[in-house]
Amino acid sequence: MKWDELLNDKRRRESSVTRAKSTDVRSAFENDYQRIVMSASFRRLQDKTQIFPLEKSDFVRTRLTHSMEVSTIAKSMGNMVSHTILNEKLDDAFTREHAENMADILSCAGLLHDMGNPPFGHFGEESIREWFRENLATLTYNDEVLTNILNEQMKQDFYNFEGNAQVLRVVSKLHYLFDEYGLNLTHATLNSIIKYPVSSLKINKKQIRSKKLGYFYADEAIFHEVTEATGAGNSRHPLTFLLEVADDIAYLNADLEDGVKKGTITIQQILRGFEEVPEHNWVTAACFNELKKKADRYAGQEEGFIAQQWLASNVRGQLINRSLEKFYENYAAIMAGTFQDSLLDVSEAFELVQVLQNLSATYIYTNQGVVESEIAGNKIITSLLDSYIPAVLYYDSAMPEKVTAKDKRLLSLISDNYIGCYRKNATNQDETTKLYLRLLLITDFICGMTDSYAKDLYQELNGLR
């Protein structure tokens, strides 16, 4: 892979006004950033769960604040990487223009990376997957079960439904800015958010690049168009490794900090979690010792302040620096598309990551309020799918008489934007593909909801308000 292609600033639809004639002095990637920030899809993240569903506190993170933090960390890492590549002469073909663009693209990717997530966090994704695994074989269309109609990739798309793949749909199709090209972002920005460059038929959890599906059957043409334009093909874009680290660092720090703020975990419990590790490597030991010092120095102060100080001044830096060491060490393999690991997983910070994950799993993710809210979210999403999937089966089909009055009313609540996207992509398609796209229409509709909207719609449809 070559940076000239990887940082491709062309769009899927180029403007009729050439950049030379335009008075716009922004780079293409700065333009991407503005399009993202000003989009409704980005604004909706302010009412989507990070870890504490339907949380009313103005302190804990939402998907919006999490995405802003990921964007900031990713941009910083991009600046550090480009500086090192230039100064250490790791790549003679890497230029100062590449360096500027790298940071801007990562900043955009951080804002985008969760834009496809459904309401109620990652449990919302699992709720969608479970619903289709349990129901797809019982739904019928023209007296035949759907599992006998849809092809294997179509079925696997729903069984392995993934918010990461939904991001590509949102920004390239669903967010109708001017036309059917969505936000019409640059090829480089689009490629950087494709964490898993495989279809649902090629999922292999043993490799990081294929751990989950990266694009739906409906978006395969877009995937190939983008990855051919950047030269990444079926390999991970090098910037995706950095985006992944930024995301991991943001959630590892934020979940713990939010947990301390909410009182679900204490500083002493964090210290005990470190002490339970038999032998610390130097990274884990350094962070443990710094927390003990801060706990003593700031004794009597709010624990959230102590956690914030520690995470910002010690943990975050260790995670960034240790992962970047692995990026430089494996630079040739990353550029060749042969590196198959997460940077954090192979770094000296791996043990620290495990400690932080175990603490969150023990004290935060199992917190009664979190679990109760996740169960409520599961009930809401399951109920919406129970109502909307049967309602959409015969919409725009050869059997319109099977669409009931209730179905029509339910469908009238779906945004014209989603309906228009469906119609645009269903034109001239066979009946099987149209049926598949109608199922995607409903997952598109649900993924576009905020937590509050999903809750309100559920209550209204079930006569609870």
Image (cartoon, grey):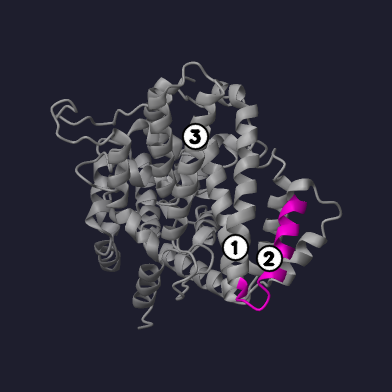
Whether residue 434 is visible: no
Whether residue 54 is visible: yes
Disc on the earlier residue, 2 or 3: 3
Disc on the earlier residue, 1 or 2: 2
At x 47% / y 46%, what residue is drawn? Answer: 164
Q: Which residue is mark 3?
A: 239
* Element type at mark 2: helix
Give the alpha-carbon distance from disc 1 to disc 2, as whole Å: 8 Å
Q: Position of residue 378 (x, y in %)?
A: 51, 67
User: Would you say the magenta stretch is mainly helix, strand or loop?
Assistant: helix
For the residues bearing labels 1 and 3, Cβ distance under 8 angstroms: no
* Mark 1 Cα-neighbour bin, 10 Å: few <14, some 14–19, many ≥20: some
Q: Is residue 289 magenta?
A: yes
* Element type at mark 3: helix
Count the numbered circles shown.
3
At x 26% / y 39%, what residue is drawn? Answer: 181
Q: Which residues are magenta?
A: 284-303
For the residues bearing labels 1 and 2, Cβ distance under 8 angstroms: yes
Q: Position of residue 437 (x, y in %)?
A: 36, 45
Q: Nearer the viewer, residue 414 or 391?
A: 414
Q: Which residue is mark 2?
A: 294
Q: Is residue 401 magenta?
A: no
Q: Nearer the viewer, residue 33 or 240?
A: 33
Give the alpha-carbon distance from disc 2 to disc 3, as whole Å: 35 Å
Q: Is residue 430 left or right of residue 248?
A: left
Q: Which residue is mark 1?
A: 309
Foreground tag (1 vs 3): 1
Callout 1, which amino acid?
Gln
